[in-house]
Image (cartoon, grey):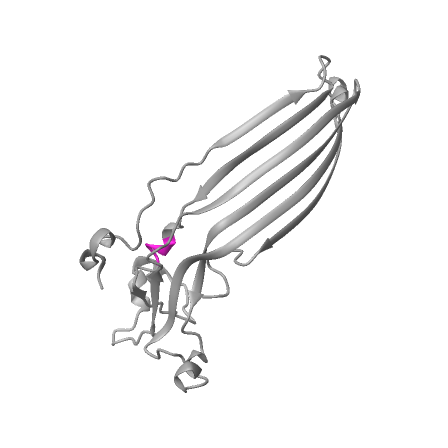
Amino acid sequence: LRTIEAPGDYQNHYFLPRHCNFAPRLGLTYGFSSSGKTVLRLGGGLFFERLPGFAFENTNPPAYSVARLTAVSLTPALFDDPYSVFPQTTMPVPPSTVTHFDQDLKTAYALQWNTTLEHELTRNLVVSGAYLGSKGNRLYRLLNVNRIDSGQFDGRPGERLFEAASSLTTINNQADSSFHAVQLKVESPGVRSIGLQFGANYTWSHSIDDASTLVGDDV
């Protein structure tokens, strides 16, 4: 079904556009004394992630084919006419890859926050500790339902469910992620007066996700 023939609000759209993606940010700083030696900083925000352009352009929904040429020698003639690499006869193409957008696809977003406590121990020594976190929601994921051996659901083990295509891929919102980190820092800004600066940093982080990239191993 072409998008121009889609019913109702879906006409001319792969999925419904979102017009209410409000992404606020907030930052606060608090000094514990008039000396300003100890400072607490807080920050957070909501960030939306657009769907990469390749999903619409390179894949040319709903289907596309990729032809790979091997053992091609680079010659001056090839630079003059790049199309000379193609044979003059009919060239078979591999089965198409069918790409489908979940009609209820929503904009992926991430919540990010951080807290930093900074203290001036001496005139030339500052220490700080920070906690950073991030939670990705409704992240984009490719799901291929036409993998080899998917034909077992139709009594054809070892084959694809739909042999006329190499894959039937749906882009959906089935991925999530989380990230947490602790950062410790010691620096001596006073040494800058003689052209030197001392600093030491330590970071511990922990990241979990079920789709590190849109073009993952589900393709």
Residue sitting farthest toward the left = 5
Q: Position of residue 57 (x, y in %)?
A: 32, 54
Q: Position of residue 43 (x, y in %)?
A: 58, 31
The residue segment tinted magenta is 54-58
Up-down relation of residue 58 to residue 72 (above or below)? above
Question: For residue 212, which quarter of the picture?
Answer: bottom right
Up-down relation of residue 137 to residue 101 (above or below)? above
Q: Position of residue 218 (x, y in %)?
A: 48, 66
Based on the picture, tell me whether residue 56 belongs to the magenta stretch. yes
Which residue is found at the position 60% from the left and 54% from the top?
Answer: 208
Residue closest to the eye, 119 or 16: 16
- 44 with respect to 13 (left or right): right
Based on the picture, tell me whether residue 211 belongs to the magenta stretch. no
Number of marks present in the image shown: 0
Which residue is found at the position 35% from the left and 57% from the top?
Answer: 58
The quarter of the image holding the N terminus is bottom left
- 184 with respect to 111 (left or right): right
- 108 with respect to 94 (left or right): right
- 148 with respect to 195 (left or right): left
The quarter of the image holding the C terminus is bottom left
Residue sitting farthest toward the right = 122
Which residue is found at the position 44% from the left and 83% from the top?
Answer: 152
